[in-house]
Amino acid sequence: MKAYAEMTKEELQSELDTLKVEFETYERMDLHLDMSRGKPCREQLDLSMGMMDVLNSEVDLSCEDGTDCRNYGVLDGIAEAKVLIGDMMENNPDNIIIYGNSSLNVMYDTVSRAMTHGIMGNTPWCKLDKVKFLCPSPGYDRHFSITEYFGIDMIPVPMSETGPDMDMIEKLVSKDAAIKGIWCVPKYSNPQGYSYSDDTVYRFAHLKPAAPDFRIFWDNAYGIHHLYDHDRAFIPEILMECKKAGNPDMVYKFASTSKITFPGSGIASLATSLNNLEDIKSQLRHQTIGHDKVNQLRHVRFFGDISGMVDHMKKHASVIRPKFEAVEEIFDRSLTGLGIGEWTHPMGGYFISFEAMDGCAKQIIHLAKKAGVTMTEAGATWPYHQDPKDSNIRVAPTYPPIEDLKVAAKLFTLCVKIVSAEKLLGIN
Amino acid sequence: MKAYAEMTKEELQSELDTLKVEFETYERMDLHLDMSRGKPCREQLDLSMGMMDVLNSEVDLSCEDGTDCRNYGVLDGIAEAKVLIGDMMENNPDNIIIYGNSSLNVMYDTVSRAMTHGIMGNTPWCKLDKVKFLCPSPGYDRHFSITEYFGIDMIPVPMSETGPDMDMIEKLVSKDAAIKGIWCVPKYSNPQGYSYSDDTVYRFAHLKPAAPDFRIFWDNAYGIHHLYDHDRAFIPEILMECKKAGNPDMVYKFASTSKITFPGSGIASLATSLNNLEDIKSQLRHQTIGHDKVNQLRHVRFFGDISGMVDHMKKHASVIRPKFEAVEEIFDRSLTGLGIGEWTHPMGGYFISFEAMDGCAKQIIHLAKKAGVTMTEAGATWPYHQDPKDSNIRVAPTYPPIEDLKVAAKLFTLCVKIVSAEKLLGIN
């Protein structure tokens, strides 16, 4: 098929008429499908049901060091959980705090503490006239939501397949001391599935920020969430690179088991320098006596070690890989050559990013919704929900059953075609 | 025996000599005993081991409304947990948010949010020159630690058997808009085990604070933690009383299952007006996607309903009641009539409060430590760790085995006697 832009007005109008007839058949199907959030599906959750068996009333709930996990204490996590999560994050257990059930909450707390108390003796951000964050965009809506909630100015930074625009980042952070942080999803990024190149990571580690309390918020959400056994992203470990570059305290690295065991019932963690850890723990001891050690022990007993966790992730991959492949195949079949959209081909993570023609994303999402398919809200992947080109759509293939997903993906491509044709015809 | 103050110098010196010989025998025992923290003992923890069996890989982890507890979602807690905890707190489930594992963390977050964003549209506390909290004292050290951490001025308010000095509280809150809150443990208070009288609760509900964002931080930590089947404290329900008094939004009420199931692996909650809930949830959605629903379900399945929880608390009581009785009996036997100390006789909660002679608490705790018995740090029960009379000592009888506890209690009374005698003799 010809690219839409090369069609005559008549050809395009004829195409649009055909598409609209097809759309009506979808409308009559009364669909209720959801490709909006990065949620594991039922089959993925079933993979972790064995975790419900490892602790029972016959089992000793003591750590290797004798700590009774049922009682108060242990602010920063039990030793064996630090080893397991340390291996998962590629960090020394000594650099790790194990938290509760949500790494998002840890990031929120980290920003909140910087607001009220400042980082390592620096002025609390709430006492400053202006605080700014760099936001590689499109990015994760819940990151942007935290900084927006705290009134932090968000500056979008363009993303590419190798990571965010490092020229721009280097320039901005070196001259503006109001820039206190940057949101990063370095591996299998949300929403593109991009992984930072070695060079990007090195350049991050060598940043020369004007602000002494500038921190990289390195959300390693998908560190071991590969879709393929061999085609995998490897990226240099950021704590080590920062240390080698003479910037040991510049990074907070976050992770959790939310998409490994049960979202909401996993364990979250932060890895950072010993200086940062000391700073954080001096606050944390006012906040809580400790996090859920029984659940930490449950995770350790279920996986045994990192090898057990890696095997477990292969099972996840075998459930969701066919879903990614199905969506990409439908996009390929329906849209290739039409010149009305591009999409990413992730090797891991939870999303495919779709770039529509400028000014079309909102309309496409609206039209899909009309036919019963919910996509992530338009603009969500940009700070303040403002996608400057109105072009980015986040596609989340993991949750729906594959047959539903195929229907949803086809309907989505139909919506892309209709909205694009109308755009080219000057109808909307 | 005569009161120490009525003894001649020679009689007292002779008594002191005897006491010191006795102390040396304790020193030779090489004790390592701990009466410092309100921790459940092993037998208490064993009571909840059945909770480890109610969920297993054969069990459906769905709520009554079909929500899969294993996946993301449900910001404010699953419906059946709200019912159970609502009954525990004597509140409507609609007034409740179920949180993570720590009510202390909920209190911290509540203060932190007030600092950065303010309460219900009022000026964020961090933008004010001065923020003050009233602190009934002696009180709970971890409460005071939160307000101190946020730089909030703490004003001690005297406590009595019926609650804090309401004349003082009414006067202060009505004229000083900088007073934004008060810490309360209304039932079986920490450390005295006092329960507020009906009149105290009514007067709280009818406060006329100058600050529109004044809130009562009502930590109902020991709401169902009775020691006796029949001699129990009943106090009016504060949300209802505030509502009736025309002050529906004036109270945040906190509770958790930390001392019901497993400390650190329980569920925490907040009960408050719908206006406050809306205010809190508008923040909470930036903080997390949701708390641990599997653990909420685990608690619901274990207890069934509030009746199951009440029965469970009777088992706790039968473990710890003998410990309270043993300590009180030793105090009675060793100290009655000497005029060198007074102590409370709680009907619930986790502590006994000991009032030594003025200027003796630090020395007593120091001396006990020297013989291997750790008490709560001197001053801990007062804001800024400053006990103005240096007289209050918190005794926590629940954790040690009863035989150890008896040794520790005897050693403690010996230390009280030595330090008091020395004080009267002008030696220290």
Image: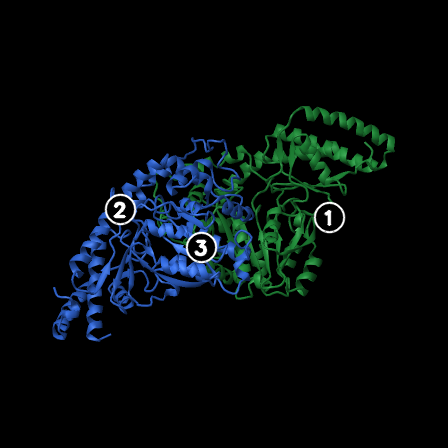
Chain colours: A blue, B green
Rendered image: mark on residue A11: none
> According to the image, label 2 marks what residue?
A227
Residue B316, position as x, y percentages in the image: 55, 37
Give whichever of A217, B88 is nearer the camera: A217
Q: Is residue A146 above or below residue B362?
A: below
Are discs 2 and 1 both within one chain?
A: no
| Mark 1 element type | loop
Name the mark nearer the viewer: 3 or 1. Answer: 3
How far apart, in angstroms, are the residues tagged by discs 3 and 2?
A: 35 Å
Are discs 3 and 2 both within one chain?
A: yes
Residue at image location 44% in from the left, 55% down from the top: A208
Residue at image location 55% in from the left, 63% down from the top: B124
Amino acid type of the residue that numbered disc 2 sits on in the rendered structure:
Leu
> According to the image, label 3 marks what residue?
A208
Amino acid type of the residue that numbered disc 3 sits on in the rendered structure:
Lys
Question: In the rendered image, which quarter is residue B231 located in?
Answer: top right
Q: Is residue A242 left or right of residue B164?
A: left
Amino acid type of the residue that numbered disc 1 sits on in the rendered structure:
Pro
Q: Is residue A179 left or right of residue A367?
A: right
Instruction: Look at the image and tell me whether residue B203 can be seen.
Output: yes
How far apart, in angstroms, are the residues tagged by discs 2 and 1?
A: 64 Å
Q: Quadrant of the N terminus of chain B?
A: top right
Q: Is residue B190 left or right of residue A78?
A: right
Name the mark nearer the viewer: 2 or 1. Answer: 2
Give whichever of A340, A294 is nearer the camera: A340
Rendered image: mark on residue B388: 1
Tags 3 and 1 touching, CB below 8 Å? no
Instruction: Look at the image and tell me whether residue B54 can be seen.
Output: no
Task: Tell me the subunit letter for badge 3.
Answer: A
Q: Is residue A312 above or below residue B116?
A: above
| Mark 3 element type | loop
Residue A113, position as x, y percentages in the image: 51, 54
